[in-house]
Amino acid sequence: MDKRNTYRTAADTENILKLRAVLKTLPAFASDYFRAASITTETSTRIKYAYDIRTFFQFLIEQNPVFKDRQITELTIDVLDMVTPLDLEEFIEYLKAYKSPETDEYITNGERGIKRKLSALRSFYAYYFKHELIKTNPTLLIEMPKLHDKDIIRLEADEVATLLDIIESGDSTVSDHQKKYLEKNKTRDLAIITLLLGTGVRVSECVGLDIQDVDFNKCGIRVIRKGGNEMMVYFGEEVEKALIDYLEERKNIVPIEGHENALFLSSQRKRIGVKAVENLVKKYSRQVTSTKKITPHKLRSTYGTALYQETGDIYLVADVLGHKDVNTTKKHYAAMSDMRRRKAANAVTLREKEN
C-alpha cells in the first residue's frame, strides 16, 4: 500500500464504518442510494448526507401525524411519494432548531446548514426518481435558501507576525503549566502554523502529511487534495526553516507503531489529529486578536488573500488552494478588500477643513 495514502485510507475506513452504523437507523431502501453514491462521492460527503437524510426522516416521524408512532427503519419507499412541497417547507422551519436524538440537545442551522441538508435530500430524491422508483420529486418545487456573502475573516500582516513571534518566543499569557506544554511543543506548533500560513493547505491535508511527502530539493510538499488528486504544493524559506527545525527535533521522538511515517506527531507520539491542530490555532490566535475567531481555515483564507493581493492572479490562487472551480475562488478573494473599503472612508469630504 502507498504510504502516502495511509492517513486517507484510515479516514475513509472510519467513515465507511460510521456510514454502516447510520444505515442501520435508516429505512432499508436507503442503502441503494448510498451504494450508488459511492461511485461519485467521497466517504466524508456520504456520511454527512446520511446524517442529513436521517434528520429528514426524524422530522417526518416527529412532526407529521401521518407517520406518528412509526419507526424510521420501518418506512418503505412509498413514503417519498407521500411528501408534499408544504411538508418540505415545514422541514426547513424544523431545521432552524430541533433536538438531537442522541444528546437531546438543540441543534440549530443557518442558511448554509439548511441548504446543505436540502441538497442532500434533493440528491436522495433524484436517485429514486431517475430510476422510476417514485413518481414525484417535491424537492424540485421548493426554493433553495439564498446564501448571503460573508466577509472573509483573516489575519492582517502584523497579526501574522505577532502570532509567529508568540509561538517562537514562548511569550504566552497562559498558566505556568500550559507554558511548559507550549515550550515542549513550540517547534512543532511553529512548523504547523507556518506551514498553514505559508502554503494555504487544508488542515486535513496538513495532518495527513508523511515525512516522505516533504521534498526539500523542490521545496514542496505532496498533498492529497479533495477528490483524491495528488498535487505538489511549494513553500518558501520561512516554511522550509520551520520544517527543518521540527524534523531535527522529531528525530528524538519514537512514534507509536503504525505512526512512524506521520510528519506531525501529537504528545502521545501518534499522528496529530485535526481537532488538536484546531485547538492549538485557537489557543495561540486568541492572544493576538479577541475580535476574530481564527481557525485553520481562516489561516488558509489569510494565505489566499495575501497571495491574491500580491499577484492579482485569481487563477493562480485557485490552483494553489486546490479549488476545482475558479468561481469559488472569485467569490471569496476577488471581492472588494478591507483595504479598499478603508480608503473609501476618507475619500469623501463632508466639510472643508479650515486652514
Image (cartoon, rainbow, N blue to C red):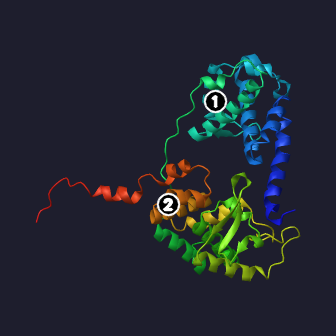
Q: Within 10 angstroms of label 1, few (less than 14), some, or many (20 or more) residues?
A: some
Helix, strand or loop at disc 2? helix
Is tag 2's residue or tag 1's residue first in the polypeptide sequence?
1
Task: Please identify the quadrant where the N terminus is shown.
Answer: bottom right
Q: Within 10 angstroms of label 2, few (less than 14), some, or many (20 or more) residues?
A: many
Give me the disc on residue 94.
1
Q: Position of residue 295 (x, y in %)?
A: 60, 59
Front-most of 242 and 21?
242
Q: Amino acid at mark 1?
A: Tyr
Task: Please identify the quadrant where the C terminus is shown.
Answer: bottom left
Q: Amino acid at mark 2?
A: Thr
Front-most of 343 and 334?
334
For residue 103, which quarter of the picture? top right
**Looking at the image, can residue 295 be seen?**
no
Which residue is denoted by mark 2 in the rendering? 305
Vertical comparison of 237 with 137: above or below? below
Q: Are marks 2 and 1 in contact (CB under 8 Å)?
A: no
Q: Which residue is depicted at the point 76% across and 34% down?
A: 54
Judge left or right: residue 4 versus residue 87. Answer: right
**Looking at the image, can residue 23 be seen?**
yes
Front-most of 226 and 65?
226
Judge left or right: residue 23 versus residue 339. Answer: right
Q: Position of residue 235 (x, y in %)?
A: 61, 72
Judge left or right: residue 207 versus residue 14. Answer: left
